[in-house]
Amino acid sequence: MKRKTAETLFHQATRKHDPIDLAGLPFERRLSILLGGNDKAAAAIAEYTGGDLRKLSGMELADLEGIPGVGRATAVRLFVFFTLALDLIGQAQDAA
């Protein structure tokens, strides 16, 4: 998927009227959108995790970068994604 396609999907998903169903997209396609349209990295991560991103949780940046097909920028995106997700989960648990 080219960057333009990822931007188009993001726009369609966020518009107020008639948005696309992100949950209905295949795992690899949603992952590619998260990674800015990087199909190669999405395919590599999908294969590495078997479709379960929780397998990446807690990995260090260097470990993420060591996944074949994942470069530095993608590893940073994943690292930030998990850092933010864990922070949000912690905040939700603290509020409960």
Image (cartoon, rainbow, N blue to C red):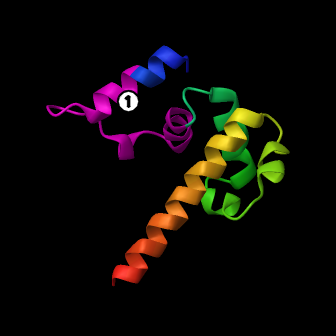
Where residue 96 sits: x, y (%)? 33, 84
Residue 6 vs residue 84, the one in the foreground:
84
Where residue 27 sits: x, y (%)? 52, 44
Above or below residue 38? Residue 95 is below
Is 4 covered by the magenta stretch? no
The answer to whether one can see residue 96 in this image is yes
Quadrant of the image occupied by residue 75: top right
Mark 1: which amino acid? Phe
Above or below residue 1? Residue 96 is below
Where residue 17 sits: x, y (%)? 14, 31
User: Secondary structure of the magenta portion, mostly?
Assistant: helix
Q: Quadrant of the N terminus?
A: top right
The answer to whether one can see residue 70 in this image is no
As helix, strand or loop, the secondary structure at mark 1 comes to: helix
Quadrant of the image occupied by residue 93: bottom left
- Give the residue drawn at x 85%, y 45%: 66
Please report the bounds of the magenta region as a residue range.
8-34
- Give the residue drawn at x 66%, y 45%: 46
- Give the residue drawn at x 17%, y 32%: 18
Q: Which residue position is annotated with label 1?
A: 10
Looking at this rendering, what residue extends furthest in the left direction?
17
Q: Residues within 10 Å of mark 1 (few under 14, many from 20)?
A: some
Where residue 10 sits: x, y (%)? 38, 30
| Number of marks in picture | 1
Above or below residue 22? Residue 85 is below
For this view, does 77 lie left or right of residue 65? left
For this view, does 2 lie left or right of residue 42? left
Above or below residue 91? Residue 31 is above
Residue 75 vs residue 31, the one in the foreground:
75
- Give the residue drawn at x 68%, y 37%: 74
